[in-house]
Amino acid sequence: MLHVVAEQIREGDIVVVVCTVENCDGMFGELLSTSYRAHGAGGLVSEADVRDVGALQKMGFPVFSRAISGKGTARATLGSVNVPVICAGALVNPSDVVVADYDVVVVVPR
């Protein structure tokens, strides 16, 4: 579903990713960040693991994740896009404002 999201990104969007099952795979990395950036995304907040952290830092694409994992994923499970989610215990709606720095991610309801 992260590839589907790329096609729906609007300039400045912060993508928030959650999983409905326990998962320790690196779902987001250099290739998707290149696509997201090209589509105008401002960054990504993920409860899922990410990979290619060195490349993400070099390209300056802001990514905040629960963990890092070098294990890639397969596109085997459908998901939902532009729906309310609970990320790190906080409700995030598609129109909310997400602001982050090295210490914290804050969700401001629209």
Image (cartoon, rainbow, N blue to C red):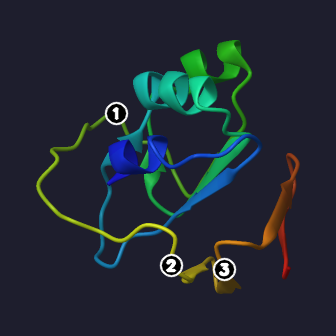
Which residue is drawn at the image coordinates 87% and 54% (left, top)? 103
Give me the C-alpha separation between circle 3 and circle 1: 29 Å
Q: Quadrant of residue 38?
A: top right
Q: Position of residue 72 (x, y in %)?
A: 25, 37
Is residue 31 shown above or below 86?
A: above
CA gap, disc 2 to disc 3?
7 Å
Nearer to me, 29 or 75: 75
Label 3: which secondary element: loop
Q: Give the mark nearest the N terminus, 3 or 1.
A: 1
Q: Is residue 90 above or below residue 105?
A: below
Q: Which mark is residue 83?
A: 2
Q: Position of residue 90 (x, y in %)?
A: 69, 84
Tell me if 12 is positioned left or right of 1 in this view.
Answer: right
Classify residue 78 as left or right of residue 79: left
Please state the horizontal and vertical placement of residue 4, each as a whole percent of the image. Answer: 35, 49
Give the residue type that dot 1 points to: Gly
Label 2 crowding class (10 Å Cα cut-off): few <14, some 14-19, many 20+? few
Residue name at image x 73 percent, y 40 percent = 11
Q: Which residue is mark 1?
A: 70
Residue 18 percent across, percent down from the top left: 47, 69
Mark toward the start of the polypeptide (2 vs 3) = 2
Identified at 78% across, 73% down, the residue is 96
Label 2 vs 1, first from the N-terminus: 1
Q: Amino acid at mark 2?
A: Val
